[in-house]
């Protein structure tokens, strides 16, 4: 669960969203798998030929930021389920002949 929480908290910084124009900088929705972080980066003044452009979360001290706790919890739960499923599949693949309820001697 801690790994899921860390993965989800880092996604706004490393998974970008594409902004088409200056107006798009006002209401950014970042995060994965559910966009739980909303940020206003309208204080940036990029040139017009900068768009479209991929942006990531910036410092909350410089750009108004809001976290949606429901979407954050849903994101952490989804990533936890994904990691649990991946672990289950990998354990079945690595030991195909071993019954699931039997332990190794």
Image: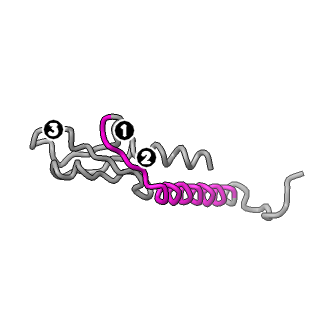
Q: Which residues are magenta?
A: 62-91
Residue that appears at 69% across and 54% down: 94
Along the viewing direction, whichever of 41 and 84 lies nearer the viewer:
41
User: Rounded to the nearest whole Å, what is the CA distance between mark 2 and mark 3?
Assistant: 24 Å
Is disc 3 in contact with disc 1, using a CB cutoff of under 8 Å?
A: no
Mark 2 vs mark 1: give the one in front: 1
**Residue at disc 3, secondary structure:** loop
Residue 71 percent across, percent down from the top left: 46, 59
* Residue 31 part of the magenta-drawn span: no
Residue neighbourhood size for the residue with mark 3, other residues' Cα within 10 Å, grouped as few (<14), some (14–19), many (≥20): few
* Residue behind mark 1: 60
* Residue behind mark 2: 11
Residue 34 percent across, percent down from the top left: 43, 58
* Residue behind mark 3: 45
Along the viewing direction, whichever of 45 and 20 lies nearer the viewer:
45
Residue that appears at 72% across and 61% down: 96
Residue neighbourhood size for the residue with mark 2, other residues' Cα within 10 Å, grouped as few (<14), some (14–19), many (≥20): some
Q: Extreme left residue here?
A: 48
């Amino acid at each position: 669960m801690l790994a899921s929480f860390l993965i989800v908290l880092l996604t706004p910084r490393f998974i970008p969203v594409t902004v088409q124009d200056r107006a798009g900088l006002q209401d950014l929705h970042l995060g994965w798998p559910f966009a739980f972080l909303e940020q206003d980066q309208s204080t940036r003044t990029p040139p017009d030929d900068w768009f479209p452009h991929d942006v990531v979360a910036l410092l909350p001290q410089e750009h108004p930021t809001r976290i949606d706790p429901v979407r954050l919890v849903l994101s952490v739960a989804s990533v936890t389920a994904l990691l649990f499923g991946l672990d289950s599949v990998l354990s079945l693949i690595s030991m195909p002949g071993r019954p699931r309820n039997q332990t190794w001697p």
